[in-house]
């Protein structure tokens, strides 16, 4: 979309937006045109938020979640059960579990999942710090909440092997999503739902 | 998505992204998480582009296209035919016409189209400046290139009435899109294609 018809600041912003995942040149142009007509404060607010994201946040030294303080508010919270660790792939997953309101333990964010195709091995994730954390402060249970994908499963298997003997390791249940329709559920999910069936 | 699980700078950026058209809270969270892991330069580059978009650009006093200079490079270009004006709804349309490489006249950007539903009348668009521009410097032809939508058509009709007697007014052809399939073309487009048929 870079042509002489647009001034450099416009093409620069279109290119910057295009560098974000899921945003192509057409969407980038529309966002830019929207901001051109929006009040100055909106572009300024977005710019400030972008700068503060990097300058004001860091990763918690204990659980690797995003935080403004060390340790993060969850790790610091005296009401949380520090002997239960929920292991997730990324900070958005922490948010998802927190929103349920039923989990009162702490977290450990791996920042990804094992993926040989993408060249991501255990050493590229925060698995070492998790093992060290558990060795230093023994816990009752580790709930592996990686995604129900090939990469998430591989990561769960690896964690299970590494943590064997150190603590109890559990995995989120696989089964029918609530509100789903049996007719449209994929075979693998149905197999897992049958395997994991419970007495009524 | 604003919860205590995320620090304020993160929720601020999620909210700022959510304020953009077509970006919901889920996408905003993903973009934010992407930038958290991306090199500092990427968030910084986007922030700078946002600030420069507003500080370094303005609208051309002649044609109302986005520009860094007064008048814009197209209006200033001595090789362009200043007696032909292509009237478009927004700056992205200028880009679309420029990309064809076959148009050598100048432009006039209306910044929208007449839409009674959205409360946009002729006075909210750059129609007054267009009439004044044509009265001061008579032109040979005005090509109305508003969108083939209800609003675009209404705007074209209005312009035609206002410009009647002042200059020749033409409208982009409506017909079959190149590469399209007759079978899938809507009725109105087919009617327009029949009406506008040409000798072979």
Image (cartoon, coloured by chain):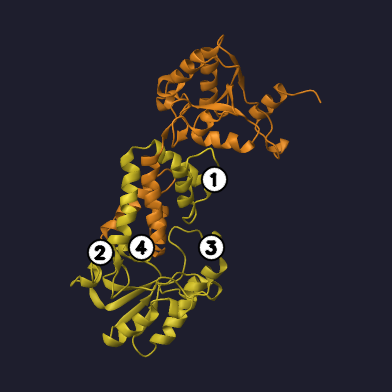
Chain colours: A orange, B yellow
Label 4 marks a residue whose chain is B
Q: Residue at x 45, y 63 (%)?
A: B177
Q: Say which residue label 1 marks.
A: B2
Of labels 1 and 3, earlier in sequence is 1
Are the residues flagged by discs 1 and 2 from a single subunit? yes
Expressed as whole percent of the image width and height from the top left, the position of residue B197 reads: 45, 73
- Real-space CA distance between mark 1 and mark 3, rounded to the nearest whole angstrom: 45 Å
Task: Please name the residue that numbered disc 2 is placed on.
Answer: B68
Cα separation between marks 4 and 2:
19 Å
Mark 4 vs mark 2: in front: 2
Which label lies toward us, 1 or 2? 1
Tag on residue A158? none
Ranked by sequence position, the earlier of labels 1 and 2 is 1
10 Å crowding of disc 3: few (<14), some (14-19), many (20+)? few
Q: In the picture, which quadrant includes the C terminus of chain B?
A: bottom left
Residue at 54% x, 40% y: name it. B4
Residue at 34% in and 66% down: B94
- Measured as percent of width and height from the top left, residue B185 is found at 53, 62
| Local crowd size for mark 2, using a 10 Å CA cut-off: few (<14), some (14–19), many (≥20) | some
Q: Is label 4 in contact with label 2 (beta carbons under 8 Å)?
A: no
Q: CA distance from mark 1 to mark 4?
A: 39 Å
Up/down of B101 relative to A183, above or below = below
């Amino acid at each position: 979309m870079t042509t002489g018809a647009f001034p450099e600041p416009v093409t620069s912003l279109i290119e910057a937006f295009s560098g974000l995942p899921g945003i192509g040149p057409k969407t980038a142009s529309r966002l830019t045109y929207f901001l051109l007509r929006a009040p100055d404060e909106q572009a300024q607010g977005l710019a400030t938020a972008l700068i503060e994201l990097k300058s004001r946040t860091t990763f918690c030294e204990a659980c690797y979640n995003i935080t403004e303080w060390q340790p993060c508010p969850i790790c610091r919270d005296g009401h949380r059960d520090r002997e239960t660790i929920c292991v997730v792939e990324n900070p958005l997953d922490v948010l998802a579990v927190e929103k349920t309101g039923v989990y009162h333990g702490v977290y450990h964010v791996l920042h990804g999942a094992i993926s040989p195709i993408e060249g991501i091995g255990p050493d590229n994730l925060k698995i070492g710090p998790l093992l060290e954390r558990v060795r230093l402060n023994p816990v009752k249970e580790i709930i592996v909440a990686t995604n129900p994908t090939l990469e998430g499963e591989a990561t769960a298997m690896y964690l299970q092997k590494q943590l064997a003997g150190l603590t109890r390791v559990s995995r989120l249940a696989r089964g029918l999503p609530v509100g789903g329709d049996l007719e449209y559920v994929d075979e693998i999910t149905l197999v897992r739902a049958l395997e994991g069936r419970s007495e009524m």
